[in-house]
Amino acid sequence: MHKLSRRSLAAVLRSGGSRYRTTAAPNSTFLISVGENESKNRWLSVLAAGSHGLPDFTKESYLNDGLARRFESTAAASDTPSPPAEKYEYQAEVSRLMDLIVNSLYSNKEVFLRELISNASDALDKLRFLSVTEPELLKEAAELDIRIQTDKDNGIITITDTGIGMTKQELVDCLGTIAQSGTAKFLKALKDSKDAGGDNNLIGQFGVGFYSAFLVADKVAVSTKSPKSDKQYVWEGEANASSYIVREETDTSALLPRGTRLTLYLKHDEKGFAHPERIQKLIKNYSQFVSFPIYTWQEKGYTKEVEVEEDPAEAKTDGQEEKTEKKKTKTVIEKYWDWEQSNETKPLWGEVEFRSILYVPAVSSTGKDDIANPKTKNIRLYVKRVFISDDFDGELFPRYLSFIKGVVDSNDLPLNVSREILQESRIVRIMRKRLVRKAFDMILGISMSDNREDYEKFWDNFGKHLKLGCIEDRENHKRLAPLLRFYSSQSDDVMISLDEYVENMKPEQKDIYFIAADSVSSAMNTPFLEKLIEKDLEVLLLVDPIDEIAVQNLKSYKDKSFVDISKEDLDLGDKNEEKEKEIKQEFGATCDWIKKRLGDKVASVQISNRLSSSPCVLASGKFGWSANMERLMKSQNMGDTASLEFMKGRRVFEINPGHPIIQNLNAACRANPNNEEALRAIDLLYDAALVTSGFTPENPAQLGGKIYEMMNSALAGKWSVPAAEIQHEQPLAAESTPEQQHTNPETYEAEVVEPVAAGSQKQ
């Protein structure tokens, strides 16, 4: 026979067989025999005849290691008449509440088991707390556990705990009214008591969570025994009923030493919940980390060898030599039922002070660019080690930190209301704030690592998430900014932090300069950098599409404002008003002339203070899009050119008065402002400024034609072969016709010369 565990044997002896009784199969046979096998080990055998439930015990004495215990018969009913059941009306709101729970409050019916296990755990917690000062409360049954038994044939689930239980009055108060749980009064008493101490963060024994049983059950019976009462009472209620009954338990087979037993009579279409395998799966999903053991009644099996009769067809024929006869056996599986603990896994965060564990994975599981998914399931929320949810849509943890994984355990959430509306809880908002702070502390620790490569690897994987945080989370800008990394004009191969930039700033520098482009190379070669590089001022190079928006949302860092050097009115702190006045007087007319030629293409033409080697540049308006932003928006507008033109910023054409081209145009303006060649030069100058400033020309083909025309004018005749050489190579003609004389008169005036070396001049 199979050996039962010592725990199972202890449970039988401790409870007098009450845990092993079932109303589903009263005629099943259950044999317990005590003896010794060859190894001198004690054993028990369980034989179930046609049912997985355990039957009543017969009146018999058992002896186990010198400990005698008598199990009284539970088969006979008491001759004493049962006290009449008392009928109670629900509080006015309870009927409406049950209808709300069944039809609206819970979207997933399987949460009923999570709620009821949590209530049982709370009852055990309360008993353990009270037993510190009242140890006599534990005398009836010392084991603190939860046991769940199912009858899949009849659709019945039984949940039994050895917790504090309830008296008759507590039963009426707790299950007949809303928000009137036993622990609610218990907590109030603790607050009023000056001598109270320890952990009083206990959730109600029963509350709204209890009524979740009606999600799957038509009828619920609650049998409970409080150590403060000498009687056991039963509460019975049905779904959609306006009343319930409370009666004294007189069936001796159903008596409990202490605690509560819930019996759920499932609806016809919900009987699938009564399968042991499904119950065990739900426990592992929702209640795996409950601090008390949860046992489920499971079918098990063991293998054994049995003898089989020999097939007559295989018998030996007459005349064959007799051989040693061997018995034939086969392996069979003997099945039995026993308790099995379903929550043996211990939580990593365990019995410690902090209630969360967060970590940063080495690489992103969704890819570096997948930061726009609002459904993040990176944080799993537990309440008293009961799994609640991992789908908060950014409520418990912000979306931009979705790469951080972890678990959170709390005892303070309002479970008696609902576990599915926690997003509206003030406690969740507080938890979010603290979790985000812890996350930033962790990331800051990585950034301060002695090994710079640690943070470089982190930034490569999750840098865009932090930039998104600059856009979405204004409250944490001060925590986000030190974690950002950018290339700069003085560090175009290694990213630097904003702290490093500020440390390298010039004493007279007031702002943090930046330029946005599509690559480090294009940013380094933009004309906007010329004067700043000449003055040794560092400029951040924003080459990621999200960089410019992130920096614009930050606005400043350590009282230093972010300034885009591609915008108009750039102040480098070196203004000379007297000199600027002289230059404006000299080139004022030229600026007006250029503006007249360009028309609405530019808002104005100004003298530039940022150029040193380029003739001109096209700056963006102070409050408009930069060239980089305009390029990005063109790729995002899905063909909506009207909105693009509306949002496009004004452009300011800035000229460099020290450049030869501008000086020549200034002279042309004074000499002949209507000169077509000078006007075409203005057009070409504007188109070139568009390209060098990062804008996209409206008509690239037209720009190409202008460049070809200017090239033709500049190169015409520069490398042409002299006409004399061409004539010398032509064959001599006897005479020319009048037509030839008319079309090529030079033939008669050509002079024969000797060949000379290339580049030499004839004297």
Image (cartoon, grey):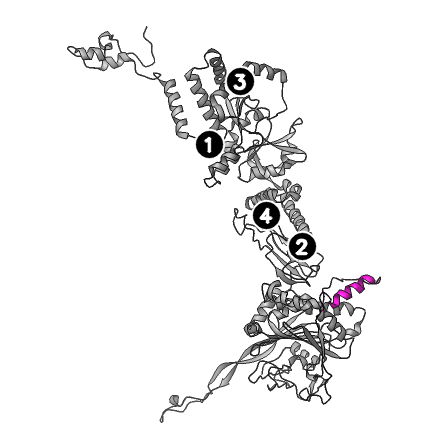
Is residue 359 visible in the rendered image? The answer is yes
- The residues bearing labels 2 and 3 have C-alpha atoms spaced at a distance of 62 Å
**The one of 302 and 15 positioned closer to us in this rendering:** 15
Front disc: 4 or 1:
1
Q: What residue is at 81 percent from the left and 69 percent from the top?
A: 133
In magenta, the rendered stretch is 177-204
Q: Where residue 68 sits in the image (x, y, percent)? A: 72, 85
Is residue 519 visible in the rendered image? The answer is no
Q: Amino acid at mark 4?
A: Tyr
Contact (Cβ within 8 Å) of mark 3 with mark 1: no
Give the vertical position of 266 relative to 719 (above or below): below
Q: Earlier in the sequence, mark 3 or mark 1?
A: 3
Q: Earlier in the sequence, mark 2 or mark 3?
A: 2
Q: Is residue 371 left or right of residue 148?
A: left
Q: Main secondary structure of the magenta part?
A: loop
Residue 696, numbered circle = 1
Residue 282, numbered circle = none
Q: Is residue 198 left or right of residue 668?
A: right
- Residue marked by disc 3: 657
- The residues bearing labels 2 and 1 have C-alpha atoms spaced at a distance of 49 Å
Q: Residue 178: say if magenta.
A: yes
Residue 400, numbered circle = 4
- Residue marked by disc 2: 428
Q: Quadrant of the N terminus?
A: bottom right
